[in-house]
């Protein structure tokens, strides 16, 4: 039987994000860390009801339970990483386009305030975790999550993420997490992807209402 969960291809070449993130970091981060989450997930769900579920459903069904913690951790990390790669694009970053800029202004007061808060949240995330820009209700929010935790179990729709596990930056930046975070925000964040996610969030809400 084929493994139920696959490692999706990267949206760009491993060297495409240089010099902000090196090909060596992507090679390890995607080729070893992300690949291992998918491999472990497949091992853990083999022969269980989770093997027939879409990844998002596995995450929803295993969150918050000690018994299913390993499955949750690997499933959520598989999802978080695929999402993270989509948030990054060569020669991107900086100020967002109009539609999302307006939402940023309403929720944070402006791009400068957003950037300050997003960067600070990523830097202050203690230990391993993630910083997120999410849509929740009619507001945008910035969240920090620990380890594998993911906003999709928190009633929030992620728009952008930064992985701040040490494996995301240590080869390129050593302990200088703030430099990594600022470089990602200024040079890699893909606002067109975030805009697509925002549109999905609102079309979903309209359906639910
Ligand atoms: Mn990672």
Image (cartoon, rainbow, N blue to C red):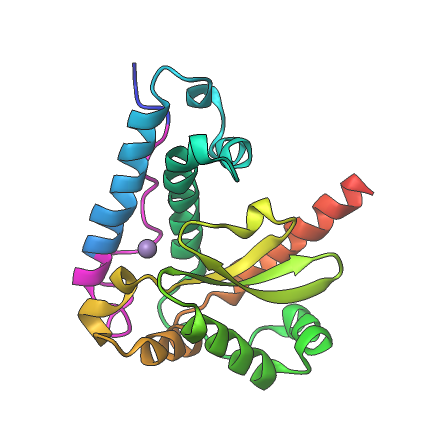
In the picture shown, does residue 91 fall above or below 4?
Answer: below
Residue at x 55% of width, y 52% of height? 151
In the picture shown, does residue 199 fall above or below 174?
Answer: above
Residue 202 shown left or right of residue 11 in the figure: right
Residue at x 39% of width, y 33% of height? 71
Most foreground residue, 109 or 101:
109
Q: Residue 183 is drawn in which quadrant?
A: bottom left
Most foreground residue, 65 or 54:
65
Q: Which part of the image, by quadrant, shows the C terminus?
A: top right
Was residue 9 drawn as part of the magenta stretch in this picture? yes
Residue 59 shown left or right of residue 20 in the figure: right
Residue at x 33% of width, y 27% of height? 44
Most foreground residue, 103 or 43:
43
Q: Which residue is situated farthest in the right direction here?
A: 209
Residue at x 71% of width, y 44% of height? 204
Q: Which part of the image, by quadrant, shows the N terminus?
A: top left
Residue 151 shown left or right of residue 70 in the figure: right
Quarter, ligand 1: bottom left
Was residue 203 drawn as part of the magenta stretch in this picture? no
Q: How far across and down, in percent of the image, does residue 55 sit?
A: 47, 33
Part of the protein shown in magenta: 5-26
Q: How far across and down, in percent of the image, does residue 184 sit?
A: 38, 72
Q: Residue 143 is drawn in which quadrant?
A: bottom right
Residue 5 shown left or right of residue 83 in the figure: left
Q: How far across and down, in percent of the image, does residue 159 sit?
A: 56, 59
Q: How far across and down, in percent of the image, does residue 60 sit?
A: 55, 36
Q: Which residue is situated farthest in the bottom direction here?
A: 112
Count of numbered marks: 0
In the picture shown, does residue 135 fall above or below 59?
Answer: below
Q: Main secondary structure of the magenta part?
A: loop
In the picture shown, does residue 181 fall above or below 136?
Answer: below
């Amino acid at each position: 039987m084929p493994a139920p969960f696959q490692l999706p291809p990267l949206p760009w070449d491993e060297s495409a994000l240089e010099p902000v993130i090196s090909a060596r970091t992507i090679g390890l981060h995607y080729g070893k860390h992300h690949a291992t989450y998918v491999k472990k997930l497949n091992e853990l769900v083999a022969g269980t009801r989770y093997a027939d579920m879409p990844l998002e459903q596995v995450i929803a069904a295993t969150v918050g339970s000690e018994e299913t913690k390993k499955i949750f951790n690997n499933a959520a990390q598989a999802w978080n990483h695929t999402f993270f790669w989509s948030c990054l694009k060569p020669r991107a970053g900086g100020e967002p386009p109009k539609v999302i800029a307006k939402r940023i202004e309403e929720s944070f007061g402006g791009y400068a305030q957003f950037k300050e808060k997003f960067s600070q949240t990523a830097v202050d995330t203690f230990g391993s975790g993630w910083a997120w820009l999410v849509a929740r209700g009619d507001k945008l929010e910035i969240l920090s999550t620990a380890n594998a935790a993911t906003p999709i179990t928190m009633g929030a729709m992620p728009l952008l993420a930064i992985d701040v596990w040490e494996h995301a930056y240590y080869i390129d930046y050593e302990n200088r997490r703030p430099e990594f975070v600022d470089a990602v925000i200024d040079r890699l964040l893909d606002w067109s992807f975030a805009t697509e996610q925002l549109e999905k969030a609102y079309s979903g809400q309209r359906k639910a209402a």
